[in-house]
Image (tube, grey):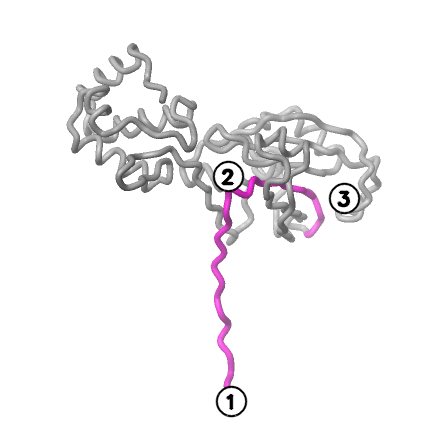
């Protein structure tokens, strides 16, 4: 089990001594240690007694900080054994059209992307049919998306080439393509058609998402239209099955039982 460096522990103790409330400062420090890998997924956290000694705070403060972290899904407890770092599943509500980063940031998650390549002109008949364009007029963009500093998905996006050439000049590490389309290029979005299925990770997904080959993957196929009902963005999204779940609210329409 890795412990925070002595210099860091002294800094935390100093901060905790001057900033109120104590448990929030402690919670944020532990949360940061989890996100930066000081405490890795599924490893045991220091005991409450050890945290009291490390951070020079009361047991009540430690317990309240750990309780909040458990509520946020960052740790879990095993009776008689202690606290362990979890690999929480993020929840995305499928009630409106949002980009992944847009949805996750609103829930307080840390998210960013790594742009891994683009191709001007493709050999994908389905993408050409979906966008109603010649394959030579389509650009493919590939990104790995991260959630709380762990890779969560491979996104393969097909857009008209003129839009794609503009997108690669933007900050795709921190900005959603949906937000760029609307706010940067003035293309309001309207609706999307979405399909979800379960597949198994191949060698490429295994390497990029740091999972075992053959692990379960959620494969999403999404075709997004502009507000003028023009297909503008066609995507294949491959999400780790252990890191994301979707929430859908269904309403039953009133029925006439005459």
Taking 194 as reference, is 93 left or right?
left
Q: In terms of sequence position, does the residue under pointer 1 or pointer 3 come before the other?
A: 3
Residue under the point 28% across and 30% down: 27
Q: Is residue 16 magenta?
A: no
Residue under the point 49% across and 32% down: 111
- From this view, report whether residue 16 is shown above or below residue 136: above
Q: Nearer the viewer, residue 110 or 154?
A: 154
Q: Are marks 3 and 2 in contact (CB under 8 Å)?
A: no
Q: Which residue matches tag 1?
A: 258
Q: Which residue matches tag 3?
A: 127
Q: In terms of sequence position, does the residue under pointer 3 or pointer 2 come before the other?
A: 2
Q: Are marks 2 and 1 in contact (CB under 8 Å)?
A: no
Distance from disc 2 to disc 1, alpha carbons, whole Å, reads 45 Å
Mark 2 neighbour class, 10 Å CA radius: few under 14, some 14 to 19, many 20 or more? some
Q: Which element type, helix, strand or loop, lies under badge 1?
A: loop
Residue under the point 43% across and 31% down: 41
Residue under the point 76% across and 44% down: 127
Q: Position of residue 4 (x, y in %)?
A: 32, 17
Query: Looking at the rendering, which quadrant does residue 140 occupy?
Result: top right
């Amino acid at each position: 089990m890795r412990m925070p460096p002595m210099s860091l522990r002294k800094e935390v103790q100093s901060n905790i001594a001057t900033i109120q409330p104590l448990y929030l400062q402690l919670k944020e420090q532990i949360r940061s240690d989890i996100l930066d890998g000081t405490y890795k997924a599924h490893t045991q956290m220091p005991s409450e007694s050890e945290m009291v000694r490390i951070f020079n705070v009361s047991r009540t403060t430690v317990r309240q900080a750990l309780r909040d972290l458990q509520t946020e899904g960052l740790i879990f407890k095993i009776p008689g054994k202690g606290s362990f770092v979890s690999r929480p599943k993020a929840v995305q509500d499928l009630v409106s059209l949002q980009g992944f980063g847009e949805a996750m940031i609103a829930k307080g998650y840390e998210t960013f992307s790594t742009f891994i390549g683009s191709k001007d002109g493709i050999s994908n008949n389905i993408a050409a049919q979906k966008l109603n364009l010649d394959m030579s007029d389509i650009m493919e963009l590939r990104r790995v998306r991260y959630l709380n500093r762990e890779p969560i998905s491979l996104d393969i996006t097909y857009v008209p080439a003129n839009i794609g050439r503009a997108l690669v000049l933007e900050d795709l590490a921190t900005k959603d393509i949906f937000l760029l389309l609307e706010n940067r290029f003035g293309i309001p979005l309207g609706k999307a058609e979405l399909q979800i299925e379960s597949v198994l990770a191949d060698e490429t997904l295994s390497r990029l998402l740091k999972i075992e080959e053959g692990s379960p993957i959620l494969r999403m196929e999404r075709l997004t239209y502009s507000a003028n009902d023009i297909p503008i963005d066609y995507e294949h999204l491959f999400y780790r099955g252990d890191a994301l779940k979707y929430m859908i609210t269904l309403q039953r329409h009133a029925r006439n039982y005459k």
